[in-house]
Image: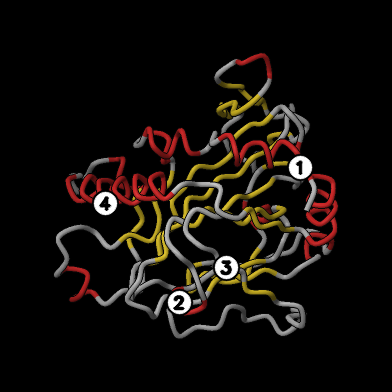
């Protein structure tokens, strides 16, 4: 597809696949870095405040989890703070060229996360809209999910509902669910167009932050590692919930005169 066709598809369907934008060497570097981050998580003391950024797989068998040399992690938040590799991946030129095509030249980063579905233990990621949990308005961010190993149905690839970004904001509840749970408890959700999006390592799924998406359990002997970033233009404002911080400083990924960060202030 041309850039114009990609943008039109994204605006209509709410998602877009960017195939093989990373090299095999780049993917290998990321996988090595994930192993290092697991070791780092295992080295943190029980009372270390950094531990809250390293979330254990909540439904894994405790005996199996305790038998491992490193923690069995579901996700790592704020990866920019712990890894130059994942800080730089957020600004990968081939990825950013596509995000700029969707959002414009001035790009800010809302989220930098690793989503990890461990082999045989990865839990269900129930259907939801990202913006339902984010204090950003209008809810028009672009979430990017980068496959760092091949993802398919058996290890819990992402599923999306095309055009669901046109439904408006809805309530979803708890996202992390046990492996035997369905992807939704709602009986009013139209799943007739549900689309699985398998990805090869080094490819990415980009989707509107109102697109309904989720993923099944990982029942395979292969992990499903994903680097997740969320980008937005300066037209999106910070709207914290009551009691939330009045300011939020975010990285500038592209544009805005080359400044490194921008502080967003909540409206009075």
How many marks do you count on the picture?
4
Which disc number belongs to residue 217? 2
Residue 19, by quadrant, is bottom right
Q: Which residue is mark 3?
A: 158
Question: Of the residues under marks 1 and 4, which one precedes in the sequence?
Answer: 4
Q: Which mark is residue 9?
A: none
Q: Earlier in the sequence, mark 4 or mark 3?
A: 4
Q: Is residue 116 left or right of residue 102?
A: left
Secondary structure type for disc 3? strand
Could you give the CA–CA distance between mark 1 and mark 4, rounded to whole angstroms? Answer: 33 Å
Q: Nearer the viewer, residue 72 or 10?
A: 10
* Location of residue 66 in the rendering, given as x and y in whole percent from the top left corner: 17, 68
Which dot marks residue 35? 4
The image quarter in which residue 148 lies: bottom left
Q: CA distance from mark 1 to mark 3?
A: 21 Å
Q: Which residue is mark 1?
A: 102
Front-most of 48 and 148? 148
């Amino acid at each position: 597809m041309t850039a114009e066709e990609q943008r039109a598809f994204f605006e209509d369907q709410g998602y877009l696949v960017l195939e093989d934008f990373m090299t095999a060497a780049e993917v290998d570097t990321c996988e090595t870095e994930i192993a290092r981050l697991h070791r780092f998580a295992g080295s943190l003391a029980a009372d270390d405040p950094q531990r809250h950024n390293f979330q254990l797989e909540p439904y894994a068998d405790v005996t199996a989890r305790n038998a491992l040399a490193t923690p069995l992690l579901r996700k790592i938040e704020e990866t920019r703070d712990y890894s130059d590799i994942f800080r730089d991946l957020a600004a990968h030129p081939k990825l950013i060229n596509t995000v700029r095509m969707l959002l414009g030249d001035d790009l800010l980063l809302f989220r930098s996360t690793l989503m990890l579905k461990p082999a045989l233990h990865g839990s269900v990621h129930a259907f939801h809209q990202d913006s339902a949990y984010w204090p950003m308005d209008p809810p028009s961010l672009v979430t990017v999910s980068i496959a760092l190993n091949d993802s398919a149905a058996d290890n819990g690839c992402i599923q999306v509902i095309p055009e669901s970004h046109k439904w408006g904001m809805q309530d979803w509840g708890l996202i992390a669910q046990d492996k035997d749970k369905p992807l939704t408890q709602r009986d009013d959700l139209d799943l007739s167009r549900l689309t699985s999006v398998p990805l090869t390592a080094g490819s990415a799924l980009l989707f509107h932050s109102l697109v309904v998406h989720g993923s099944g359990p990982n029942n395979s002997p292969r992990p499903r590692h994903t680097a997740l970033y969320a980008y937005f233009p300066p037209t999106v404002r910070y709207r914290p919930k009551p009691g939330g911080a009045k300011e939020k400083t975010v990285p500038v990924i592209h544009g805005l005169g080359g400044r490194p960060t921008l502080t967003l202030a909540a409206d009075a």
